[in-house]
Image (cartoon, rainbow, N blue to C red):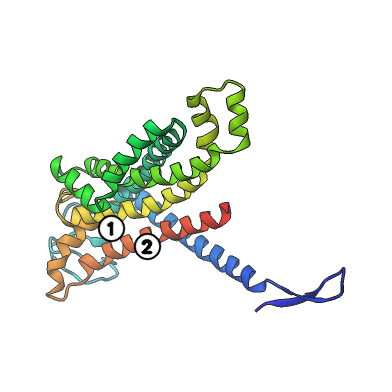
Amino acid sequence: MATTGTDTATGDPVVLRGNAVGRMRLGDSTAYAAFTVLGLIIAAAILVPPIFGAGDVAQDSAGLLPPSVEHPFGTDRYGRDVFLRCFAAARIDIVLGLSVAVVVLMIGSAIGAVSATFGRAVDGVVMRVTDVLLAFPGVVLALIITASLDKNAWFAATAVVVAFVPLLVRLTRAKALEVRSADYIAAARLTGASTARIAVAHVLPNSFKYPFVQSTLVASWAILDFAALSFLGVGVRPPTAEWGAMIAEGVGDNLGGSWWPSFFPGLMILLSAASFQIIGDWLDRRLR
């Protein structure tokens, strides 16, 4: 609820923005929860496989055991512990998601800054290539590239990078065009700075924060795309633990009432992707 106060100059009552403060605190609390969830997943991905095993081999002679104290997430049709496999898969999905976000940020920001700084000829070529890539939905473009290469985690990562780089190129270019008209850019040109130096030393750093925020969303989308590629059979090869592949293996068991082999990997995807999305929204508010 908004609170009231008194203007010290006129003595008139004024309304304080208590609701805005409350929303800010609520947003911060949600972001802290997202940081906590993501941190726990990463910590478990680091600690669980070395201590308890990766779950790639049969952990129990009986398959499709429901969740219990011994197997918190149950076992799949091959008798493998779903709990162990979920956190072994986190090593692939989280690492590749973060790796894609960093690479897309670096490549997309650099190309966007160059496109905005080097004149119409370079900008026209870059934008036409970007338009062609953006004509395909990200997951479809990644599917085409991955299917043309091989079933490999790093090939899938490369495909997702190619799919998302155009988004950050567009965003960086838009911000770089605003920065390019600033007075300090004109001053740099008057001092004899080259176009390349202006792009790297002035345009790129001053248009970087928006692509940086967007990169957290790219990490979320990359996790979803990895899962989709593996679910379709063109991502990580079984029996390697990966969330999308685990869902694909467990879908057929749902008809028999065994919901846990696909539910828990799906829950991990939801928690990880949502955490990155919330963190990105929080960073956007803080940087603004």
Examine the image and state in which quarter residue 275 appears.
bottom left
258 versus 216 height, above or below: below
Q: Position of residue 145 (x, y in %)?
A: 19, 43
Question: Looking at the image, which is closer to me, 206 or 128?
Answer: 128
Examine the image and state in which quarter residue 166 appears.
top left
Quadrant of the image for the C terminus? bottom right
Residue at 22% over, 65% down = 262
Residue at 50% over, 65% down = 30
* Label 2, residues with CA under 10 Å away: few <14, some 14-19, many ≥20: some
Residue at 47% over, 50% down = 213
In the rendered view, does 159 fall on the left or right side of 13?
left
Q: Which residue is mark 1?
A: 86
- The kind of secondary structure element at disc 2 is helix
Question: Looking at the image, which is closer to me, 112 or 53?
Answer: 112
- The kind of secondary structure element at disc 1 is helix
Q: Which residue is mark 2?
A: 271
Q: Position of residue 244 (x, y in %)?
A: 22, 57
In the rendered view, does 272 fall on the left or right side of 78?
right
Identify residue type, mark 2.
Answer: Leu
